[in-house]
Image: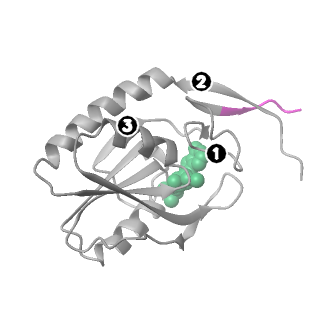
Amino acid sequence: MPQAAYVIDQMISAKSIAARIEDLAHEIRTSFEGTDKLVVVGLLRGSFVFIADLVRELDLPVEVDFLEASSYGDGMTSSREVRILKDLRGEIGGRDVLLVEDIVDTGFTLHHVTRLLQTRQPRRLETIALLDKPSRREVDITATWTGFTIPDEFVVGYGIDYAQRDRNLPYIGKVRFTGD
Ligand code: IMP
Ligand code: MG
């Protein structure tokens, strides 16, 4: 099926994102001060740009691992069922862990993945989401740290896709359909 035509209106500039990440990295560093190692877990694929920028601002001993969970299909609607498509490579038992998510929307993904990771008994598990759409929430969950709270718009860029497109935009933009 051909995709409907759309344009992307910039919502958060690359510069604002970078500035916010500097602040978040500072808070995280303070919070995990003294850790022997922080395992930073990126939720694929949407968090790959965010995690890359975040760890480079993080002045702590870090390890990076990835986990892939499915929630959206190829469209714009969320599904309640969350499946693990790719699990972590490393063990997190007894470790300090930071889970990195691109967007918290209904909250199902973050809820499910944090519950799964808790069963592995990390010493401490915190979460960070670049974006939060609280108006869409169906599960009562909030990330420990949030980059930006945004309205109920479908966004792309900075790692986030619409049907696998637009992940390479350096900024966050909202999708606007043009009707042709
Ligand atoms: P949740 O399980 O409904 O909270 O969905 C979280 C996941 O849905 C995020 O990790 C994103 O991959 C995806 N998602 C939610 N909102 C958007 C959006 O506006 N654009 C692109 N992907 C989104
Ligand atoms: Mg996604």
Which residue sits at x=53%, y=70%? Answer: 86
Distance between the alpha carbons at the discs numbered 1 and 2: 14 Å
Q: Secondary structure at mark 2?
A: strand
**Type of amino acid at the residue the image marks with label 2:** Gln
Where residue 18 appears, x then y in whole percent? 40, 27
* Circle 3 residues within 10 Å: few <14, some 14–19, many ≥20: some
Q: Is mark 3 within 8 Å of ligand 1?
A: no
Of label 3 and label 2, which has the lower sequence position?
2
Distance between the alpha carbons at the discs numbered 3 and 2: 16 Å
The quadrant in which the C terminus is found is top right
Q: What's the colour scheme?
A: one colour
Q: Is mark 1 within 8 Å of ligand 2?
A: yes
**Bounds of the magenta segment:** 175-180
Q: Is residue 35 magenta?
A: no
Where residue 7 appears, x then y in whole percent? 74, 28
Of label 1 and label 2, which has the lower sequence position?
2
Residue occupied by mark 1: 161
* Residue nearest the observer in this picture, 79 or 119: 119
Residue 160 placement: quadrant: top right
Which residue sits at x=30%, y=78%? Answer: 119
In the picture, measured across the screen, residue 46 lies left or right of residue 62, that is right
Tell me if residue 46 can be seen: yes
Of label 1 and label 3, which has the lower sequence position?
3
Q: Which mark is residue 10?
A: 2
**Type of amino acid at the residue the image marks with label 1:** Asp
Residue occupied by mark 3: 147
Q: Secondary structure at mark 1?
A: loop
Which residue sits at x=22%, y=35%? Answer: 26
Which residue sits at x=23%, y=40%? Answer: 59
